[in-house]
Image (tube, helix red, strand yellow):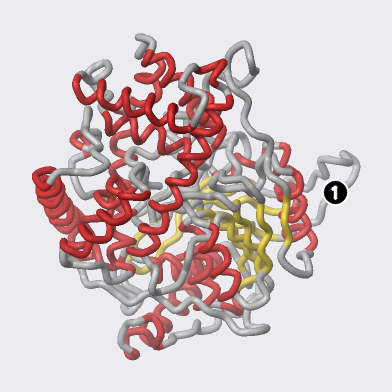
Amino acid sequence: MRAAVLYSAAGSLLLTTLAAAPAPAVPHAPARTGVPGASAAAEARGSAEAAARARRTGVAFGACPADLPAPSGMRCGTVSVPLDYAHPSGRRIELTVSRMPATGKDPRNSKRRVPRQGALVYNPGGPGASGMAFPMIGVVPQWKRIAAAYDLIGYAPRGVERSAPLSCEDPARFFKAPTQAPVHPTEAYKRERITRAKAYARGCAERSGSGLRFFNSLNNARDLDVLRAALGEDRLTFMGASYGTYLGAVYGTLFPSHLRRMVLDSAVDPDPAQVWYRDNLAQSAAFEGRWADFREWAARHDDVYGLGNTAEKVQAAYDTAARRLAAEAAGGKVGPGQLQNTFLMAGYYDDFWPSRAAALSAYLKGDAKPLIGLAVPSPGMAAEAENGSAVYTAVECNDAPWPTDWKVWDRDNTRLARVAPFETWDNAWTNLPCAYWPAPRQQPLDVRTGPGELPAVLILAAERDAAAPYAGALEMNRRLSGSVLVTERDAGTHGIAGGPNACVNAHLDAYLLEGRLPARRAACGPRTEPLPDGPAGRGSAQSPRDALKGKGERTAASGRS
């Protein structure tokens, strides 16, 4: 589902080889996967065979790619996985992997050595995001205790970056600017977007070939188990964010005995009936509430930004900017579409609020430079963004049935846009290629574990998260027996682990370092609200995430992660 990607060192957000470790057990091959029983059984056998092969081979770590700004001590390598797990001896693809060894240093006591607990593997979500930069997080103070005990492991999932990269269109054409973003589109505009969606779906098939159907969440979970084996781990310690929580839940359902600990940060709704069409509708509805949060914050700081002292007046200021940009694009590149995407990011992360409010204020006063600086896509990011978009589309379209009748999309999104206009149609256009997808669909796995089947899982969620609405965390908690949900109240930043909330981090540390969880659902107070820029506040003019564009952080080109 549509989600922003963050794996920077400013963001919120292991390797002991066992010489005589046993080969992995054959995973579950449940009929609930939605694929024929014989095929599911073949894939289960193929998964076990691939994992056993990976344990024998391991990972030959060496220098990291030149375009990955790896610090001293960080190493990279590859793991071979089958393209099709039903034929494990057939075509294979290589997944890139990164590792920062556990430091063993207690940040609170320099004389104390910390026992190593193995590998912590991280997936940042998307689908379509790379976690290759994740090991760099170990230098951030909130992560140092975890980095002392675990080798931090990042990887690029299948289709992402160098891991058998997918493509659906020429990257040179990916950043279309300026673009429109009508909240109530005309029939002519809808027909134009249908044409574009069909062309995009065809492009995915033409540029990615016959293997396109193998890029899905079930195979992502099987790849994760091969990676576990290659790292020499009998049981996986895993942390997933956003879509990565769904991946983790699928992994736990398929391989429950292979899990040691698992953290699901900003959990999405894994109900098969929601994946992925209805999940995206729920996300669009949730963004309206988060957009209101931003507008209310800007109104409280009208003395700084001058956008109006009510949420309605801030909306009017935004609408004025959109109309002006529709008539004349700022810098020839920033139209209403770029404006919408820039403010969409404020729905993901509230540390974006000051920079967005300041840019809107400046533009309305005649200075377009701050808005241009935030909204114009970087040409150097085009190939990476196009690849992320292709993987996102392939995985979500392959994972589940989508409505193939445009009338269903039109009905549902027209109704929703009446009460949630900010994000509804933009999200629909992002996912519309799934209506015309050329590859076979599968039924989503019925993610569910019984008592004692899975180790206790820590689920983290912000109560007002728009990208992963809170109802999804509640559903994930219900479906994973023995899991515990920790909620950040009255907050909406997407991804809360290792961020500024000390209460959330205390639960994270207690679980990963000691295996301790609250006895029942727990709540943490909200993080501190961002301060405005200017004389009434002391916020920074640029969010740390904005400052990292083009420096190792993937930014959402069209809202995808």
Query: Where, by quadrant of the figure, is residue 178 drawn?
Result: top left
The outermost residue toward the bottom is 38
Relative to the observer, which residue lies in front, 154 or 10?
A: 10
Judge whether residue 58 can be spotted in this image.
no
* Residue plotted at (48% across, 24% down): 357
* Residue plotted at (71% across, 50% down): 504
Q: As displayed, is residue 50 above or below residue 396?
A: below
* Residue plotted at (86% across, 41% down): 108
- Residue 150, percent from left and from top: 69, 54
Amino acid type at image mark 1: Arg
Query: Where, by quadrant of the figure, is residue 327 drawn?
Result: top left
Q: Is residue 508 left or right of residue 71?
A: right
Q: Secondary structure at mark 1?
A: loop
How many circles with numbers are drawn on the protein?
1
- Residue 371, percent from left and from top: 38, 20
Judge whether residue 432 can be spotted in this image.
yes
* Residue plotted at (37% across, 53% down): 163
Badge 1: how crowded within 10 Å, few (<14), some, or many (20+)? some
- Residue 253, percent from left and from top: 52, 77
- The quadrant in which the N terminus is found is bottom left
Name the residue beneath numbered marker 1. 113
Relative to the observer, which residue lies in front, 110 or 18?
A: 110
- Residue 19, percent from left and from top: 65, 70
Q: Is residue 93 left or right of residue 502?
A: left
